[in-house]
Image (spheres, helix red, strand yellow):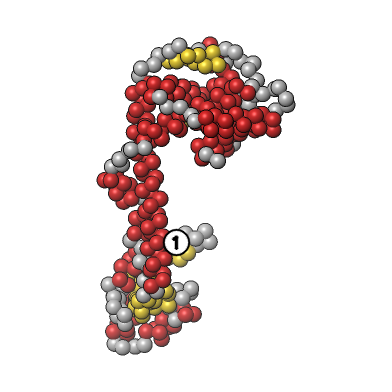
Amino acid sequence: MNKKIVYIIAFVTMIIISGCSTNTTNKQYVITIDEEKVLLDEVLLYLNEIEQEFEAIGGQDIWETNFDGMTAEEVAKQRAIENVVRIKIVNDKARELGISLSEEEMKDIDRFVLEYLKEYYEEGSGDESLVKEVFKENLLVNRVYNDLTKDFEPDEKRIAQYLLEDENYKYFSSFSLEQYRVKHILLKTHEISGNNNLEPLALEIQEEAYEKALEVLEKVRLGEKFESLVLSYSQDTESIQNKGEYTFLKGEMMEAFEEAVFNLKPGEISDIVATPYGYHIIKLEEIIKPSQEAVEFFEEQIKELEEILTKNNIQMQKNEAFNKQYEEWKKEYNILINEDIWSNITVGK
C-alpha cells in the first residue's frame, strides 16, 4: 500500500472515530480563498482533529490553558484555519504545476472512502464526497511537497551544527567504554537526608574531617596498607564492605572525583579530593579496557544515531524550504474568514 495513502487514512480515521459528523449540514462558508469558498463542515473536520490532539496532550484541562496570551481554543481554531488555507493553496498550486494523483491512487482513495463510510456510518449517513475530498487534497499536498523537495540539497554545515548541539550525540560521542576500578577513603562533610538531599554536618565536624583526611594521607604516604586504612577510617558505608572499591564508567561519578582518577596511573594515590560528600583519598587500581566486540557495537550505535539525526535535520531543512515557498504562494491569495460564523464555533466544550 502507498505510504502516503496510509498517512492520510490515519488522519481521516481519527476524524471519523472522534465523532465529527461528515453530514453536509453546515452549508455556510467560513473561508474564502480568492474565488474558492470552504464550507464550515470541512473546516470542522480539521478543527476536530486538532481538538483530539490537544486533549491527548493535556486532557480536558488544556482548554483552561493560555498560550502566549491566547486561549487554547483560540490557538486550536487558528491552527485549523491555517491548515485548511495551506491545503487549499497548495492544491491550487498543484494544478498550476501540473501535479496530480495517479489513477491508481484515486482508485485507492475511492475504495478506502467506501470502506470507512461503511464501517463507521449507517448507510447513506456519511458525506462521501467530503471525506473523499479530504483524502485527495491531503495526499496531493504530500505529492507537491515531494515533487518540490526531491532535488533538495541540504546545508552540510547545518547538519554538523545540529549534531554538535544534540545532547545525546554530544554525550555518546565523548563517552568512553573504559572502566576505572578504584578504592577510596571518605571523610564526610555532608550526610544524605531522608529525601536524598545532602545536608551539611556541623562546621567543627567538617573541619575535623579535613584534619583527619590529612592524617590518613600522611599514613598512606608512609606506606601503610591502603585497604587497612579504608577499614579504619572511611565513612562511605556503601563501599566499605568492599574495601572502598568502585568500578565506574566516565560520567557516573562526581566531576571532581573523576578528574582526580583520570590524572592517576594504576597504583597511584591522589591528594585530598573535595566533593559535596566530603574529602576523599583515591587509589586507582586498574583501567579496564573494553572488548573489541563492545567497541564495535558502540561505534555502530553512534553511527545509527548520527544517521537518524542527519535524516531529521535534512527533513527540517526540507520543511523550512517548502514552508518558505508556501509563504510566498500565500501572498498571492486574498483570504477572508467569515467571523460571523467562525466566532460562534466552540472547542473543548
**In the rendered view, would you say 172 is above or below 343?**
below
Q: Quadrant of residue 277?
A: bottom left
Amino acid carrying mark 1 in the image:
Leu
Q: Which residue is mark 1?
A: 198
Q: Is residue 27 left or right of residue 231?
A: right
In this picture, is 46 found above or below 298? above
Quarter holding the N terminus?
A: top right
Query: Between 345 and 272, which is closer to the camera in this rendering?
Result: 345
The residue that appears at 33% across and 23% down in the rendered structure is: 328
Quadrant in the picture for residue 332:
top left
From the top left corner, tell me how far across and down residue 88 is, in percent: 46, 22
Say what secondary structure mark 1 lies in.
strand
Where residue 225 sits: x, y (%)? 36, 87
- Residue 97 visible in the snapshot: yes
Could you say where residue 27 lies in the image, as x and y percent from the top left? 59, 13
In the image, taking residue 62 as reference, residue 18 lies left or right, namely right
**Is 348 located above or below residue 220 in the figure?**
above
What residue lies at 31% left-to-right and 51% top-to-bottom? 164
